[in-house]
């Protein structure tokens, strides 16, 4: 393998986000896939577990191995954590011993409040991290983290953060009061191990959680960290009958005197020069607004807003497995490693 490639491990490579990381990293010019873990699928070829990868020439020799064999692969530069929530903390010492950095896609170490951690991540509460994890959103975090351990945002959390952050980013929030968010997600959001019967999803659109979703405290924490705002957030989630994609609609009451132009400028300012968060200019027709078919397959999040009668309705859409997970993680890796931010990342969607 060429010298200018970094060695990468994907821990949980038989799952949906791990598989997507493998798919994208196979095309990455600066990455060697050094180790891919699975437990139930250990011993299988990558192309057997993810048939959509079996014709890639670099996938031919790749086999999934139990995490316990990580040391045999030799040290890696980056290990991506793609394990179910609560599973990584116990395995972190082994991973940290063999990896210079850990980028975790799971929620284990995103929250800081001990009570919230006990409520939403009870298995994590029993295993405090070896060192603090830096929470990192490439477009919004003020600096590229140099810590060994990095937490990437949750998929519905980051969709909502992209939708709301500009309203709170200025010296004064543009919003007067409570923000109501309605998030809708595709079935891959639950992971390959979710066990949800397809017949209950197909042809259906139903509530996932009206209250108490674990991404709500993450959104509040991130918005507070980014802008100092204490956001009165109501957050409900629903299950869509699609494999991939998240769409978020956020309803905010604007402060007296805030104009549509103020809001448009705030969104333009927040994402200027960022290749993967695109604010839709002046949407009018339904197809001008963010939609799943414009983002699924890409690392792009689309955002748009409409202001009327003192209310701002913001819509955001992204692919939960790419911009909400694997693509976001690669974008973070690129920036942390000094590569081009866009390396190995798709900007066009797959449709129809
Ligand atoms: N799905 C999404 O849209 C999304 C988006 C953002 C973040 N995330 C987060 O990313 C993480 C992975 O999600 P996912 O959807 O990819 O899950 P998934 O499809 O269920 O995959 C889980 C992976 O972890 C492995 N695994 C399960 N139990 C394990 C254990 N006890 N020890 C070691 N490996 C184990 C599985 O391997 P075997 O089955 O072969 O044992 C599989 O490779 C989760 O923390 C999730 O919250 C998911």
Image (tube, grey):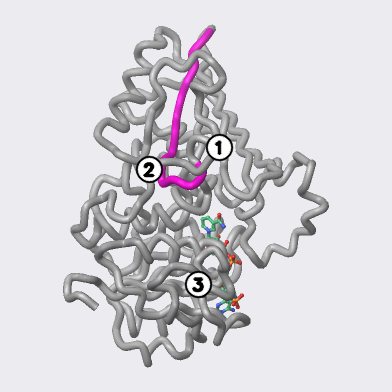
Question: Mark 3 CB in 8 Å range of ligand 1?
Answer: yes
Element under disc 2? loop
* Picture quadrant of residue 36: bottom left
Q: Residue at x 63, y 50 (%)?
A: 243
Q: What residue would you read off at disc 2?
A: 347
Quarter that holds the C terminus: top right
* Magenta stretch: includes residue 204: no
Element under disc 3? loop
Disc nearer the start of the sequence (2/1): 1
Does residue 51 appear left or right of residue 144 in this picture?
right
Span highlighted in magenta in the image: 296-308
Q: What mark, if any, has residue 292 been given in the picture?
A: 1
* Picture quadrant of residue 278: top left
Q: Is residue 183 above or below residue 75?
A: above
**CB under 8 Å between discs 3 and 1:** no
* Mark 3 nearby-residue class (10 Å; few <14, some 14–19, many ≥20): many
State the image coordinates of residue 306 (x, y, percent, origin top left): 49, 16
Does residue 116 appear left or right of residue 209 in this picture?
left
Q: Nearer the viewer, residue 118 or 190?
A: 190
Q: Is residue 80 above or below residue 156?
A: below
- For the residues labelled 2 and 1, the Cα–Cα distance comes to 14 Å
Q: Is residue 176 visible?
A: yes
Disc nearer the start of the sequence (3/1): 3
Q: Of the residues tagged 3 and 2, which is closer to the observer?
A: 2
Q: Residue at x 77, y 49 (%)?
A: 201
State the image coordinates of residue 29 (x, y, percent, origin top left): 26, 63
Q: Principal SS element in the magenta part? A: strand
């Amino acid at each position: 393998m060429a010298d200018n490639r970094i060695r990468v491990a994907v821990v949980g490579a038989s799952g949906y986000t791990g598989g997507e990381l493998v798919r994208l990293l196979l095309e990455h010019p600066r990455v060697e896939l050094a180790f891919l873990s699975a437990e139930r699928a250990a011993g299988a070829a990558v192309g057997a577990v993810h048939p959509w990868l079996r014709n890639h020439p670099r996938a031919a020799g790749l086999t999934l191995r139990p995490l316990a064999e990580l040391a045999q692969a030799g040290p890696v530069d980056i290990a991506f954590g793609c394990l179910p929530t609560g599973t990584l903390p116990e395995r972190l010492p082994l991973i940290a011993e063999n990896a210079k950095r850990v980028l975790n896609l799971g929620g284990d170490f995103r929250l800081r409040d001990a009570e919230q951690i006990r409520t939403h991540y009870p298995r994590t509460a029993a295993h405090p991290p070896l060192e603090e994890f830096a929470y990192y959103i490439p477009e919004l975090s003020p600096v590229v983290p140099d810590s060994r351990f990095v937490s990437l945002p949750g998929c519905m959390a980051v969709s909502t953060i992209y939708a709301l952050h500009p309203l709170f980013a200025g010296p004064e929030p543009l919003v007067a009061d409570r923000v109501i968010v309605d998030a809708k997600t595709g079935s891959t959001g639950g992971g390959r191990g979710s066990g949800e019967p397809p017949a209950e999803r197909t042809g259906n659109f139903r509530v996932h959680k009206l209250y108490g979703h674990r991404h709500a405290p993450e959104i509040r924490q991130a918005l507070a960290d980014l802008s100092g705002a204490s956001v009165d957030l109501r957050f409900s989630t629903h299950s869509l009958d699609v494999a991939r994609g998240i769409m978020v609609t956020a309803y905010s009451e604007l402060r007296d005197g805030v104009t549509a132009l103020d809001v448009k400028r705030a969104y333009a300012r927040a994402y200027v020069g960022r290749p993967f968060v695109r604010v839709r200019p002046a949407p009018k027709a339904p197809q001008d607004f963010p939609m799943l078919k414009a983002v699924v397959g890409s690392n792009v999040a689309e955002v748009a807003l409409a202001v009327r009668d003192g209310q701002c309705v913001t819509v955001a859409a992204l692919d939960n497995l790419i911009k909400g997970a694997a693509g976001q993680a690669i974008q973070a890796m690129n920036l942390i490693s000094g590569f081009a931010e866009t390396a190995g990342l798709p900007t066009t969607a797959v449709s129809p």
